[in-house]
Image: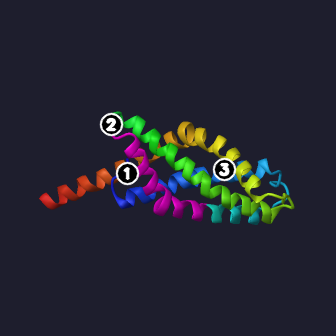
C-alpha cells in the first residue's frame, strides 16, 4: 500500500504506535504490574518498545517479511491474500523480537524470574502471538490502512495534483 519511503515510514509509524500501545497495555495487565508501575515507568516502557519496534519494522522485519510473503504468494493474484501474508509474516517476526524486549522488561519490573529463560521467553512469545496476530489482522491492520488511505494517501495525491497544476500554469 505505501509506495514511497515517506509513505512506508508513516505507515510503519502509525502501525507500530497502535500495536505497541495495545501490546504494552496487554503485557502490563498480563503480568499484573500495571498497578505497581508509575505513569513515567509505563510511558518510558512504551517509548522504548515503540522505538525498538519501529526500528525493527523499518530496517529488519518489514523488508524481510515482505520478501518472504511475496515469495509465498508469487502465484497469487489476489492483493488481499498478499496483504494478509505480509501482515502475518510481520507479526511472527515482530512478536519474536519484541518478546525478547518483553522478557527483559518483565525481569526489570518484577521478581518473576524462573529457572529457565528459554521457557519464560517461549511463554511470552506464545502469549504475545496469540493476541498480536488477530489484533493485527482484524483490528489494527484495517484501522491503520483506513487512516493511511484517508489522511496520507489522499493528502499526498492532493499535493501531487496541486504540483502538476502549478507546473502547467
- Say which quarter of the image contains residue 70: top left
Q: Is residue 80 visible?
A: yes
Q: Secondary structure at mark 1?
A: loop
Q: Which residue was labeled with disc 3?
A: 23
Give whichever of 61, 143 is nearer the camera: 61
Q: Locate the C terminus by quadrant.
A: bottom left
Task: Please report the residue visible at 50 percent of the width from the left and 57 percent of the height from the top.
Answer: 61
**Which numbered disc flags the more N-terminal residue, 1 or 2?**
1
Q: Position of residue 92 (x, y in %)?
A: 56, 48
Q: Position of residue 66 (x, y in %)?
A: 42, 50
Give whichever of 113, 7 is nearer the camera: 113
**Residue 71 lies within the magenta run:** yes
- Say which quarter of the image contains residue 102: bottom right
Q: Is residue 141 left or right of residue 96?
A: left
Vertical position of residue 5 compared to residue 148: above or below: below
Counting the numbered discs, the total is 3
3D distance between C-alphas at marks 2 and 3: 34 Å
Magenta residue span: 50-75
Task: Please report the residue visible at 32 percent of the width from the left and 34 percent of the height from the top.
Answer: 77
- Tell me if label 2 and label 3 are in contact, CB under 8 Å: no
The secondary structure that dominates the magenta segment is helix
Please state which of the two labelled residues, at mark 2 or mark 3, is closer to the viewer: 2
- Say which quarter of the image contains residue 98: bottom right
3D distance between C-alphas at marks 1 and 2: 22 Å
Amino acid at each position: 500500500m505505501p509506495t514511497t519511503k515517506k509513505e512506508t515510514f508513516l505507515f510503519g509509524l502509525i502501525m507500530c504506535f497502535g500495536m505497541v500501545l495495545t501490546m504494552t497495555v496487554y503485557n502490563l495487565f498480563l503480568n499484573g504490574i500495571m498497578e505497581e508501575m508509575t505513569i513515567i515507568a509505563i510511558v518510558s516502557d512504551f517509548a522504548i518498545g515503540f522505538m525498538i519496534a519501529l526500528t525493527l519494522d523499518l530496517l529488519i522485519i518489514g523488508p524481510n517479511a515482505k520478501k518472504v510473503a511475496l515469495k509465498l504468494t508469487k502465484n497469487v493474484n489476489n492483493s488481499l491474500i498478499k496483504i494478509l501474508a505480509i501482515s502475518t509474516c510481520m507479526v511472527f517476526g515482530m512478536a519474536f523480537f519484541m518478546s525478547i524486549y518483553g522478557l527483559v522488561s518483565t525481569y526489570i519490573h518484577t521478581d518473576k524470574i524462573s529457572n529457565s529463560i528459554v521457557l519464560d521467553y517461549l511463554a511470552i512469545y506464545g502469549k504475545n502471538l496469540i493476541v498480536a496476530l488477530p489484533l493485527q489482522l482484524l483490528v489494527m491492520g484495517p484501522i491503520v490502512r483506513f487512516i493511511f488511505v484517508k489522511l496520507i494517501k489522499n493528502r499526498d495525491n492532493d499535493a501531487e495534483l496541486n504540483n502538476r497544476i502549478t507546473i502547467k500554469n
